[in-house]
């Protein structure tokens, strides 16, 4: 086996080695864990500027290049956000020393010669329902995506058995992102707070507390799911008041 063939095989099997060799990207330890995850579902509950979008973009690009006929969907709460994640994908693509040929290349999607596609979509149920059998769905800023859209995405993976990646900072004790992260389920869950990110200084973290206040500081930089300040009852109080042993009344 030639050195080039061996490297291609190694890069196919190890996204971390590929990212390091070809993307000018040296992953943090948690990013290595995420890139090497081989399961079906993963949640990245990460602070702002931690590198979660770069990690997701690298996963999308690796899948598209090394697995022919793959469909990768990038979903965000707005078109601007999904376009930004797609821009990170194309930025990483431009770093490759040996770029795959593109048969389609526009502002929101690309197709490689191996017929793999990466498509960026806004949080629109009608738009998303036009696709079937994705091999990977990446929900960026998932805490801002509606529950309705998320529940319409899940059946798309039933036949393809594709991967589902949710990445976000928290946005209160509400919505599917909160419930999927806090419930006992089969997701791989990774939490990265600002103090664990080598690119965010301790001085900056401390200064932010004074500027934005404790509530936002704990949510944005320490990934805590905070109770909304306008809520009359806490999430725990409402949850504890429920009695699932009571059968609902039938109304004719």
Image (cartoon, rainbow, N blue to C red):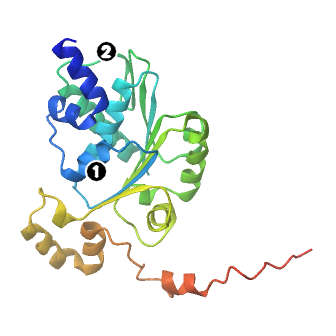
| Nearer-N-terminus badge (2/1) | 1
Q: Position of residue 248 (x, y in %)?
A: 79, 78
Q: Mark 2 and mark 1 in contact? Answer it, CB < 8 Å.
A: no
In the image: residue 90, left or right of residue 183: left
Q: Which residue is mark 1?
A: 52
Residue 107: x percent and y percent? 35, 30
Residue 87 is at least partly visible in this image: no
Instruction: Tell me: residue 161, above or below residue 216.
Output: above
Location of mark 2 (residue):
101
Tell me which residue sits at (14%, 42%) in the image.
26
The quarter of the picture where the C terminus appears is: bottom right
Tell me the quarter of the picture where residue 98 sits: top left
- Residue, far top: 2
Residue 186's disc is none
Q: In this view of the protein, which residue sits in the foreground, 58 or 105?
A: 58
Give the Cα distance between marks 2 and 1: 27 Å
**Residue 232 vs residue 183, the one in the foreground:** 183
């Amino acid at each position: 086996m030639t050195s080039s063939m061996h490297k291609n095989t190694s890069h196919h099997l190890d996204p971390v080695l590929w990212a390091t060799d070809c993307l000018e990207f040296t992953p943090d330890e948690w990013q290595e864990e995420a890139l090497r995850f081989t399961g079906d579902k993963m949640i990245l509950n990460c602070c702002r500027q931690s590198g979660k979008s770069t990690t997701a973009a690298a996963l999308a690009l690796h899948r598209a290049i090394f697995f022919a006929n793959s469909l990768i969907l990038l979903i965000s709460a707005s078109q601007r956000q999904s376009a930004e994640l797609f821009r990170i994908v194309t930025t990483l693509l431009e770093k490759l020393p040996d770029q795959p040929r593109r048969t389609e290349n526009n502002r929101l999607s690309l197709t490689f010669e191996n017929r793999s596609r990466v498509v960026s979509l806004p949080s629109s149920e009608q738009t998303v329902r036009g696709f079937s059998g994705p091999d990977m769905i990446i929900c960026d800023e998932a805490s801002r995506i509606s529950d309705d859209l998320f529940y319409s995405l899940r059946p798309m993976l039933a036949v393809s058995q594709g991967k589902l990646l949710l990445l976000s900072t928290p946005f209160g004790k509400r919505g599917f992102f909160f419930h999927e992260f806090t419930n006992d389920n089969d997701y791989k869950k990774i939490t990265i707070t600002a103090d664990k990110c080598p690119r965010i200084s301790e001085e900056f973290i401390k200064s932010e507390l004074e500027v934005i206040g404790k509530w936002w500081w704990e949510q944005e930089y320490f990934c805590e799911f905070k109770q909304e300040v306008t809520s009359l009852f806490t999430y725990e109080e409402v949850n504890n008041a429920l009695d699932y042993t009571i059968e609902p009344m039938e109304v004719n």
